[in-house]
Image: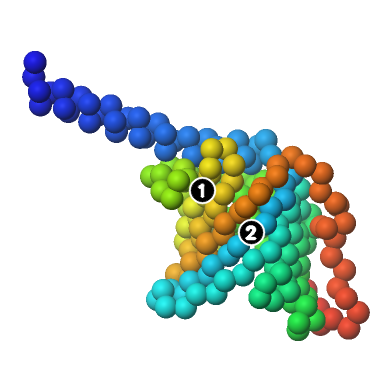
Amino acid sequence: MNTPFLKSLAAAGLLLASMAARADAVDTLREFVRDVKSGKSAFSQVVTSPDGKKKKTSSGEFEFQRPNRFRFAYLKPFDQAIVADGQKVWIYDKDLNQASSRKMSAAIGATPAALLAGGDLDKDFDLKPQPDRNGLSWAQALPRSKDGQFQSIQIGFKGKQLAAIEIVDSFGQRSDLTFTDLQTNVAVDPAHFRFVPPAGADVLEQ
């Protein structure tokens, strides 16, 4: 027996098996966008400065209903909300009583929200499988537009379930979102995707 040959063959087999496993993450992402029409989950978010020295942690609740409706309700440390109603994306800060909005077409594009709202993945992103880590399989989504606000987005799955999103913006700031107790294709209250600025709120429409 040619031992070096067998070792090379075994190594090649392991490499192919690894590549096949990693390719599944891109397939899983496509299936998630295609088949999951609604969902809700708790989430936590850690934002790290470009130099890695400063971190901000927040948490809250997340809901979505395709197409183009989602809601991030930040509960800690501040009460804030990001709401997409199908036409506009609203950002509201309760403590400041300030709200701003942008048209959906301008706000989404090649952003993490497009992955959740049900955008055209292959039109907006270059998708690549990544090595497994932290018990998750990962797909990378690189925005095709060079003028966007994000350098890269990575989406982690536990089996077929969305578990994490890692975002690096154009300034090198990193945001890590972790989803827990995600329920998919469940009834979500349509009222959660409607935003009416509270009385007296400062409103900026872009």
Q: Quadrant of residue 149?
A: bottom right
Q: Quadrant of residue 76?
A: bottom right
Q: Secondary structure at mark 2?
A: strand
Task: Please identify the residue farthest to the top as the structure is shown.
Answer: 1
**Position of residue 30 measured from the top left corner of the image (x, y, whole percent):** 58, 38
Image quarter (top left, top right, bottom left or bottom right) of the N terminus: top left
Q: Say if residue 63 shows up in the picture.
A: yes
Q: Secondary structure at mark 1?
A: strand
Is 40 situated left or right of 58 in this image? right
| Amino acid type of the residue tagged 1 in the rendering | Gly
Q: Nearer the viewer, residue 144 or 138?
A: 138
Q: Quadrant of residue 2?
A: top left
Colour convention: rainbow
| Amino acid type of the residue tagged 2 in the rendering | Phe
Question: For mark 2, what is the residue?
Answer: 43
Question: Which of label 2 and label 1 is nearer to you?
Answer: 2
**Position of residue 147 measured from the top left corner of the image (x, y, whole percent):** 52, 63
Question: For mark 1, what is the residue?
Answer: 156
The count of marks equals 2
Please tell me which of labels 2 and 1 falls first in the chain.
2
Which residue appears at 16% of the width and 27% of the height? 7
